[in-house]
Structures are given as C-alpha cells and as structure tokens.
Image (cartoon, grey):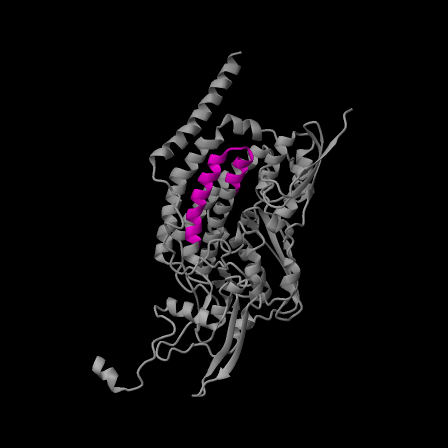
Amino acid sequence: MSSIIADILRSANSIVQGHLVTIREFFQKPVTEQYPDERLPRMEGYRGHPTLLVEPETGRPKCTACGACARACPNNAIELEGMKAEDGRRLPAKYRLDMTRCLVCNLCVEACPFDALAMSREYELVSWDREGLILDMPDLLRAGAKEQGLTYPLPVKAPVVEKEGEKA
Amino acid sequence: MTDTMHLNMGPQHPSTHGVLRLMVEVDGERILSAKPDIGYLHRCFEKTAEGLTYPQVLPYTDRTDYVAAMTNEFAYVLAAEKLLGLEVPARAQFIRVIMAELQRMANHLVWFGTFALDMAAVTPFLYAFRDREKILDLFERASGARLTYSYYRIGGVRKDIDAEFVRMAREFLDYFENQVLPEYHRLLTGNRIFELRTQGTGYISPEQVFAYGLSGPMARGSGVAWDIRKNEPYSSYDRFDFEMALATGGDNYARYTVRIKEMAESARIIRQALDGLPEGEVMGKVPRVLKPPAGEVYVRIEAPKGELGVFIVSDGSTKPYRLKWRAPSFSNLQVTEAATRGEKVADLVVTVGSIDVVLGEVDR
C-alpha cells in the first residue's frame, strides 16, 4: 500500500517538475519570429540561387560563356549560348537557369574560372508558376548586380573622358 | 479465438515519421505482426549517381538522410578520397568532426522532439526545435545553407570557419550543457508517464541486434558496444577523448538514454576540436578532373542513426560505375516486427519512433 502511495507521489512530483520548466517560459521573451513582419538577419555567406556578376566598368556580364558551370551542374539546370562582342570578347548570348532543377549546391560558382558567378542572398525563391522559376540572363544579372551593390542595367557612362576629370 | 484485424498505419499518418506504411495485424489491442512497407520516397539515388561525376554526386547525398546531411557527405567524401588516395589537411579533418558532431546533436534533437511527440508530449518537440535552430544557425554561418549544406568537398571542406563561428559554437555548447540538457531531464527523463510508456516496451535482445544487423543507438541501447568512432576511428576521431554511450535495457527507454548521453558526448568532442583546431589549409591538393583508378572501396562511418556505409565501384572513368548506400535506418527498420510482436498498438508508435527512421534514407 505504502509503495503505491509513494509511486503516486513520485508521479505527481515528476509532472509538477515538468510544468515548472514550462511555466518559466511564460516569463521569458518568446523565441518565435513573426515572419514576414519580422525578418531575421541572414548569416554572412548565405546561399540563395546562382547569379551572374557584372563588370562595373562596362556593365557587361563577366561571363565568357565557356560553359564550365553547365558542365559542373549535377542537374543540367544551366543552359547557355555564347557570342562574340564587337571588341572580340566572348559574351553569353543566352543564359538560362532553371530553378526547378537547381540544388543550390554552389558547384557552378566553384567551377567558374572567371569568378563571374556568385550565390545571391535571396531566400524567398518562390513563384506562382513554373515559368517564374526559370531565370533568364537579365534576371540573373539584376540579382548579381544587387550582390555587388549595383543596380542593373548600369547607367551608361559618358564616353567623353574629360567628364571624368570634371567630377574629380 | 477472435478474428484478427488488419490495420494500415500510414503512409499518411502523423506518427510514422514520413511516408512509412506499416501493415499491422492485431488481435484486439495486441500486435500479431507489423510489416513495414517502404518505397514511397524512392528517388533512384544510387542509379542517378552512376550518371554523375564524383563531385556532382555530393549534393545528392545531402538528400538521402536530410535530417543529418553533414554525416552523409562525410561518408561519401571519405569513400571518394580513399578511392582517389587523397590527403586531407588536418584543419579540414577537425572541421569535419565539428560539423559531424553538431549534426549528431541536431539529429538527436529532432529525434528527441518527435519521440516525445509520439507519446503526445508536445512541449519537448517545441523545445528541441528551438535548440536545433541554434545548430542550424551555426551551419548557415559555415556553409550558407540550413538543411542541404553541400559543405564537404572531396579533399577538404568548401570554406574555412572563422573566429565568429568558433565563438558562436562555444556559446551554443555552454547553453546546451548548462541549460538545455538539465531542462530536458526535468521535462521528460523522470516523468512517470514517459517511463511507463517506454520502459519495457520495444525490447530488442543483443542477439537480435546481430541477427538484424542493427547499428548505432539501436545496438548500443541493447548493450552491444559498437561505435565505429571508437572501434574503427576514421578522420581524426582517434584524437578525441569521449565515452561510448551505452545502455543495457534494450527497451525504448534505454535507447532514449543512449541518445541523450550521446548528445553530451558530442558536445565534449566539439569542445576538444575547437580547442585543438590546427591552422592551415582546408582544402588539399585535388586534381581538376577526378579520375580514380579502377577498383572498389567500402567506407563506413558512425552516422547519428547508425553505420552509414558507402560502397563505390570505379571503372576508371570520371563517374562511379556503381554506388551502394548502406543506410542505417533501412537496416534498423527491419527489427520493427520482432520488437513489437505481442505488444499493444499504442507501443508500436513509440517503438517505431525509437528506431529513428528517416524515409528519405530508407528509400533513397
């Protein structure tokens, strides 16, 4: 009989102990974040989707359409075609990233020999339809320029050299 | 003699931890047999790997056991490095151990939460996810992602960890050891309802451990001292001082104590690794095109769920000829029927929970 009472007391105590833990939480700051009203700061180096970087001087993509990223991609998410610019430099004519296939694995960025790719810091990679997840060259350049602290398309610089001197 | 009833638990059932279907035959409340039916999440991972080059397989390994992506990568890169005969710098080895042990803690936190949730205790689930979030923050800081990290590389790791990471990791370990574990013990360990539900249910004998090829906490909960980190140290595990978490009960409660103890031991390993972190490169010398010689290799590591083995057959080309993934949850799931026969239906949920299955890994 006494062992039953002891057991009941022990059981009751264990539940009281558990409740004491939870009651303490009433007096603490809630850990929940009210997304989307509150947004947590992103960690440095957060990986969003791959983007194309631009040359700040010319506003052209740094990409030379060598295709190393497309070959490195495990899922063939990258499709590109090259062309020759007027000054002889190779540029991408078409660059398509299919985000429905992208694994966000960073292998394309590591494969790029010209450091023309970077991962964005976007995390709201959603769309109402599949077409919205297929990113073309302007989308990727816009996102890439944002990572560089620029806005794409870059304002066309005045071709006259003297203007540079006036500014300085 | 009453008629027996067939009961389908899953694949859409809140307590089957994913798309697992259990075909249960019951006599009243007693279980006569419980057969797992798997394959709902089969994604042809092993076959897909045959069409990919060695570095390209890596992001896919993240997606087998998505609760413990770091250790999957760990097993794969170790296998590929053994095949290629690559050296890994000491700093990268230590970083790999830190990440693997953090991942073990994160995995056991998910397990702890869902295990309690299977017994209708909602609070531990919320607490465990609150604390797991801090580990994910650490991973985000190091790798840039929160679930599928793609952080390990053949020959090292992708990015070095910085002083801020080390500070955050130490802060987390202090918080974990001084606040989280005592809180969990007060919340659940001594709880009488929890004890009644777990003690004596889902018994697995040491003989059954060997018969079913169980590993990890499933084996150690039955008193089988088998931890690959101890028995066959890989990477730099022989440099750390830690104890093997062991319990002899063989029931669900024993597996619970093993996992709780393992989290504390992981914290100890991480502290030692952070203290002894060597300077230097995090990436060894790796050829641009990885073309291993023909041959085969088997590497196993102690993943949070048990023995994770990777078997690669190379035919000398840039792609693996065959890749076999020995998934711990797949092997551990076999024991469901033997562990639950003759028990009550309500205990089936608890026992399946104690196995710690992730269907992404079972089906691959």
Would residue A159 be seen by someone viewing this image from the given angle? yes
Residue B5 drawn above or below residue B140: above
Q: Is B329 left, or right, of B282 in this rendering?
A: right
Of all residues, the one furthest to the front in this rendering is: A128
| Residue at 60% from the left image edge and 49% from the top image edge | B307
Q: Nearer the viewer, residue A40 or A126?
A: A126
Main SS type for the magenta part?
Answer: helix
Q: Nearer the viewer, residue B115 or B3?
A: B3
Q: Is residue B247 visible?
A: no
Q: Is residue B127 magenta?
A: yes
Q: Point out residue B162 in the picture as x, y percentages from the top left corner.
A: 37, 58
- Picture quarter with the C terminus of chain A: bottom left
Q: Is residue B62 left or right of residue A155?
A: right
- Number of marks in the image? 0
Where residue B109 sits in the image (x, y, percent)? 49, 42
Instruction: Establish if B24 lies above or below B46.
Output: above
Segment colored magenta: B111-139
Residue B13 image position (x, y, % from top left) = 61, 40
Q: Determine which quarter of the picture holds residue B357.
A: top right
Residue A121: where, in percent of width, then height?
41, 61
Residue reaching furthest top? A1
Q: Residue A155 in magenta?
A: no
**Which residue appears farthest toward the right when viewing the image?**
B1
